[in-house]
Amino acid sequence: MLYAIIAVDHDKSLAARLGARPDHLARLEALQAEGRLILAGPHPAIDSPDPGDAGFSGSLIVAEFPDLASAEQWAAADPYNAAGVYREVQVKPFKRVFPT
């Protein structure tokens, strides 16, 4: 089943995000290589694809996991959590409707 991992960043966490980014991306690349990643990306803190020093307000990941507990465990192990980037993380079942 698909799960949406919705994370909210702490204020002023851009430096921590950039420091943990290589490890964060490596985990996403592993999901992609397994054919389980649907989409992933950050939410710019301002209305711009390149927010510069404004940074990001959070992230969204949609991926396939065997069950909710597995998705929650994967999300909890995200390097952004260890680096103090994320203030809050929600994991929810996700039903894909479009695109088919």
Image: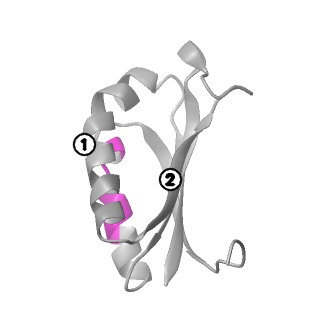
Kindly identify which numbered label has been placed on residue 63: none
Q: Is residue 89 above or below residue 86?
A: below
In what quadrant of the picture does the C terminus appear?
Answer: bottom right
Magenta span contains residue 47: no
Residue 26: x %, y % from top left: 26, 48
Q: Residue at x 34, y 77 (%)?
A: 70
Structure colour scheme? one colour
In the figure, is residue 37 to the left or right of 79?
right
Label 2: element kind: strand
Please rate how many residues cluster around mark 1, counting C-alpha atoms within 10 Å: few if below 14, some from 14 to 19, many from 20: few
| Image quadrant where residue 55 sits | top right
Q: Residue at x 33, y 35 (%)?
A: 21
Q: Which of these two is toward me, 21 or 91? A: 21
Please name the residue that numbered disc 2 is placed on.
Answer: 40
Please name the residue that numbered disc 1 is placed on.
Answer: 23
Q: Earlier in the sequence, mark 1 or mark 2?
A: 1
Residue 20: x %, y % from top left: 29, 35
Task: Examine the residues drawn in magenta and state their main secondary structure.
Answer: helix
Residue 82: x %, y % from top left: 28, 43
Q: Amino acid at mark 1?
A: Asp
Label 1: element kind: helix
Q: Is residue 55 above or below residue 69?
A: above
Residue 60: x %, y % from top left: 55, 53
Q: Is residue 88 above or below residue 20?
A: below
| Image quadrant where residue 45 sits | top right
Please rate how many residues cluster around mark 2, counting C-alpha atoms within 10 Å: few if below 14, some from 14 to 19, many from 20: some
Q: CA distance from mark 1 to mark 2?
A: 14 Å
* Residue numbers of the magenta segment: 73-80
Q: Amino acid at mark 2?
A: Ala
